[in-house]
Image (cartoon, rainbow, N blue to C red):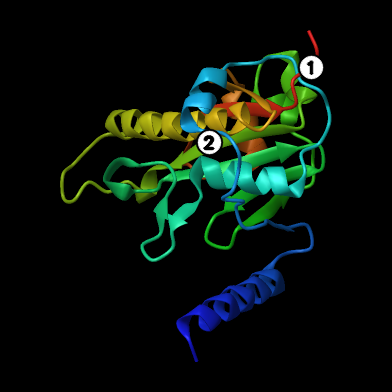
Amino acid sequence: MSMNFRKPMAAAFAAIIASAYAGAGDIQLMEPMMENPGTLMEALQGRSSCRSFLPDTLSTREMSDLLWAAFGINRPETGGRTAPSALNHQEMDIYVATAEGTYLYDPAANTLRMTGSTDIRALTGMQPFVAEAPVNLVLVADFSRMGFRGREVGDDERLFFAACDAGFICQNVYLYCAVNGLAAVVRAGMDKAALREALGLRPEQHLILAQTIGRPAPL
């Protein structure tokens, strides 16, 4: 059997397994569309922040490509991601708040795992638009994954590295949106106590940033 034949078979088998283990509210994402139009220079030229969004939902294709661009796996043989992280801790989790509920992005299974059926978009920020935009990403750092190879570090240092890693992810999202007709804005202001409770975070999980995504409303 040739390698070219085994690869599609392996991918199909993985998709079947992922589907079998997905919960009732989970969303199986699509493989990233690598032929996406737009050059890096065009993305940089078009990158901007927007605070006025249409309520239109994003398609599964858009969500799949958006999340892969944010922090998906681009090197399956090593588990490497599209955004760097300090010492390859990969400590960042992406929660996705929509009108239908809240999901956790699982890049290994390429799936959105439903974590709650309540619309918590309004809790992800202080501005009114967060409750109406279709998607709010919440970036959460799990400090328990951030070992420093025998060196003792405090939470302040972990927070610094996590903030840097969250910035890389948010910039990936900005660049994806810039060449795909979407708008985004990154935000730090949120009611952290209420949002932590709504997401059911553990003590070692820390809210870092949020980012709103949708179609820009006409000015």
Q: CA distance from mark 2 to mark 1?
A: 25 Å
Amino acid type at image mark 2: Leu
Residue 200, disc: none
Quadrant housing residue 210: top right
* Residue on which the image places disc 2: 139
Of the numbered discs 2 and 1, the one sitting upstream in the chain is: 2
Q: Which residue is found at the position 38% from the left and 66% from the top?
A: 77
In the image, residue 90 lies at what x, y percent? 39, 48
Q: Quadrant of the C terminus?
A: top right
Can I make out residue 201 in this image?
A: no
Instruction: Describe the element under mark 1 as helix, strand or loop.
Output: loop
Q: Which residue is found at the position 62% from the left and 46% from the top?
A: 65
Quadrant housing residue 19: bottom right
State whether residue 119 is above or below residue 76: above
Give left or right: position of 59 versus 139.
right
Find the residue positioned furthest to the bottom. 1
In the image, residue 108 lies at what x, y percent? 52, 61
Q: Which residue is found at the position 51% from the left and 38% from the top?
A: 140
Give left or right: position of 3 versus 198.
left
Q: How many marks?
A: 2
Give left or right: position of 96 versus 159.
right
Please rate how many residues cluster around mark 2, counting C-alpha atoms within 10 Å: few if below 14, some from 14 to 19, many from 20: many
* Residue on which the image places disc 1: 217
Pick the front one: 116 or 18: 18
